[in-house]
Amino acid sequence: MKRRRKYRSMSYAAVLRLFAEGRYALSDSGVGNASGELLSVHTCHRGYRYVRFYHAGRRRAVSLHRLVWMLAHQRTVPPGAVVHHLGDSKARLVPRADELVLMHGKEHEQWHADHADEHAEGDAAALREFLEG
């Protein structure tokens, strides 16, 4: 039986450093390495897309919407926060940064509880009003 290689976990900050060093790049087509090869994208049962990074014996799976937000803001998502999709950005392979909003986990739960019967999550104005209210 072939043994699987064991990897240690990589931090989100380390993933950001890999992009800053030019080892990876983000485009509308996906995430590519320094050679220009696209990394494979995995879709979970809830429709979120993930990319796996491997470097120096460490690995990290990162959702594309979280990665786009982190690269746009040059920082990691704070603990307890979530990156929320506006509209149908979940259908796009690589969402645009302006289609993503950082929310506290409790705010996010409340937003979906209040708008469960509607498709108001696509309404950016309604979301901003909710967050300011």
Image (cartoon, grey):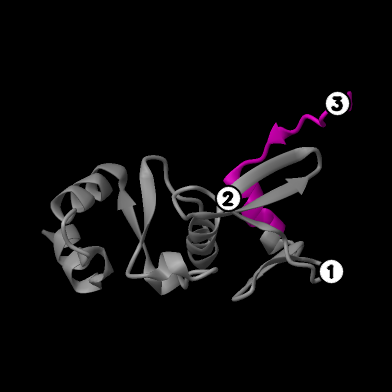
As measured in the structure, the alpha-carbon distance from the residue carrying label 1 to the one carrying label 2 is 20 Å
Q: Disc 3 vs disc 2: Cβ atoms closer than 8 Å?
A: no
Circle 1 is placed at which residue position? Answer: 35
| Quarter occupied by residue 32 | bottom right
Query: In terms of secondary structure, where does tag 3 sit?
Result: loop
From this viewpoint, which residue is outermost toward the bottom? 28
Which amino acid type is marked by label 3? Arg
Residue shown at 59% from the left, 76% from the top? 28
Numbered mark located on residue 63 in the image = none
Foreground residue among 127 and 92: 92
| Quarter occupied by residue 2 | top right
Query: In terms of secondary structure, where does tag 1 sit?
Result: loop
Q: Disc 3 vs disc 1: Cβ atoms closer than 8 Å?
A: no
Which amino acid type is marked by label 1? Ser
Quarter that holds the N terminus: top right
Q: Crowdedness of circle 2 by 10 Å Cα count: few (<14), some, many (20+)?
A: some
Q: Is residue 127 left or right of residue 75?
A: left
Circle 2 is placed at which residue position? Answer: 62
Foreground residue among 3 and 63: 3
**What is the x, y in percent for residue 99?**
38, 70
- Judged by depth in the image, the label closer to the viewer, 3 or 2, is 3
Circle 3 is placed at which residue position? Answer: 3
**What is the x, y in percent for residue 58?**
74, 39
**Magenta region: which residues?**
1-18
Q: Crowdedness of circle 1 by 10 Å Cα count: few (<14), some, many (20+)?
A: few
